[in-house]
Image (cartoon, rainbow, N blue to C red):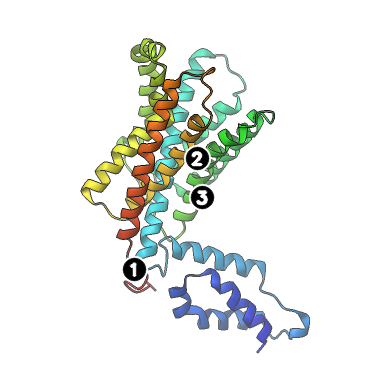
């Protein structure tokens, strides 16, 4: 037997959780070695890239609630899927708000700008995911993320020293839900087809905000600029996350719920930090800084409590047996 190749296969298998390796390592190494044939050490044999990719994919499925997963990894998989659903729901709400603003103003729009394309893609990806069409939702969501990141790069002002501070949270708001979508919704997770009533909540929130601002809030916003921090999308998401966190803690929901809310709360916190770190009173009222600081403090407390509750609620690594 080729000792060098066997050792390298065992190194690749370190991508898998320890509990999974304890049950399957010898079997998997034997299968890899049989498939590779007899290659002498002098030829410096290495695992094929396809084999490494297959082990990496298996590792993701196991760590996020797939075949062979233990209860702890099942919880992490559920948390990833909830982050993806709520993250895409947020982008779908913002996309609906954007479309509701742009199209009435430009009915003769022939070639939609990047903003319109991104908004439409986010809404489409969210609807597909909620209807259980995960294989179709993934490429649409990735396209939406790619266009959103491209638009972010185009708008980036390299002359502004604070530009990276403003752009990084926006990029994370795109990347994290997409990563959760790819990691959580794998082949071992059966699709869940949700009702149109639940699907319509995110677009309805965007439309409601579009209607409420000019009809009910416009005069108040001019009189109290600090209200902008609460009614713009990230501000509203902050309020929703804090309320959802309180409900989650009061009802002692499963560990994956506080973990997902803690991840999303961290994204909201990072989005608020630029308003706190860049306090230019000449360009914005000090009340906006005060409101932003209040939101940051609320998010720090809520994220900390949710993370502690989530980690405490996770099953032990030794709890339960892997599902074969």
Mark 3 or mark 1, which has the lower sequence index? 3
- Report the disc number at residue 179: 3
Position of residue 136 in the picture relative to residue 191 (left or right): right
Q: In the rendered image, which residue does mark 1 sit on? A: 316
Establish if 98 lies above or below 106.
Answer: below
* Residue at the spot of label 2: 173
Which residue reaches farthest bottom? Answer: 1
> Which residue shows up at 60% across the image and 35% down it?
147
Sequence-wise, which precedes: disc 2 or disc 3? 2
Describe the element under mark 2 as helix, strand or loop: helix
Estimate how packed mark 3 is, as few (under 14), some (14 to 19) or many (20 or more) residues with alpha carbons within 10 Å. Answer: some
- Point out the image quarter for the N terminus: bottom right
The span from disc 2 to disc 3 (Cα, nearest Å) is 11 Å
Write down the quadrant of residue 146 in the picture.
top right
Position of 18 with respect to 202 (left or right) is: right
- Cα–Cα span, label 3 and label 1: 25 Å
Q: Secondary structure at mark 3?
A: helix
Residue at position x 32%, y 65% in the image: 315
Choose between 243 and 73: the one closer to the eye. 243
**Element on which disc 1 rests:** loop
């Amino acid at each position: 037997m080729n000792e060098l190749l066997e050792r390298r296969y065992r190194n690749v298998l370190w991508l898998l959780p320890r509990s999974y390796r304890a049950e399957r390592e010898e079997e998997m190494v034997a299968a890899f070695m049989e498939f590779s044939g007899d290659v002498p050490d002098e030829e410096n044999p290495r695992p094929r890239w396809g084999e490494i990719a297959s082990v990496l994919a298996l590792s993701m499925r196991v760590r996020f609630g797939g075949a062979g997963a233990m209860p702890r990894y099942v919880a992490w998989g559920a948390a990833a899927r909830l982050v993806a659903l709520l993250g895409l729901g947020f982008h779908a709400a913002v996309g609906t708000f954007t479309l509701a603003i742009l199209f009435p103003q430009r009915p003769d729009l022939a070639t939609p700008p990047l903003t319109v394309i991104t908004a439409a893609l986010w809404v489409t990806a969210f609807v597909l995911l909620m209807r259980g069409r995960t294989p179709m939702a993934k490429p649409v969501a990735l396209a939406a993320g790619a266009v959103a990141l491209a638009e972010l790069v185009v708008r980036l002002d390299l002359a502004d020293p604070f530009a990276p501070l403003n752009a990084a949270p926006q990029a994370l708001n795109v990347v994290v839900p997409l990563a959760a979508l790819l990691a959580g919704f794998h082949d071992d997770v059966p699709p869940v087809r949700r009702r149109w009533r639940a699907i319509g909540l995110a677009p309805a929130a965007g439309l409601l905000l579009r209607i409420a601002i000019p009809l009910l809030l416009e005069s108040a916003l001019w009189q109290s600029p600090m209200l902008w921090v609460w009614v713009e999308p990230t501000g509203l998401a902050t309020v929703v996350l804090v309320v959802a966190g309180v409900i989650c803690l009061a009802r002692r929901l499963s560990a994956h719920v506080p973990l997902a809310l803690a991840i999303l709360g961290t994204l909201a916190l990072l989005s608020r930090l630029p308003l706190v770190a860049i306090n230019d009173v000449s360009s914005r009222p000090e009340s906006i800084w005060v409101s932003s600081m209040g939101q940051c403090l609320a998010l720090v407390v809520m994220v900390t409590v949710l993370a502690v509750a989530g980690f405490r609620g996770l099953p032990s690594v030794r709890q339960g047996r892997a599902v074969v």
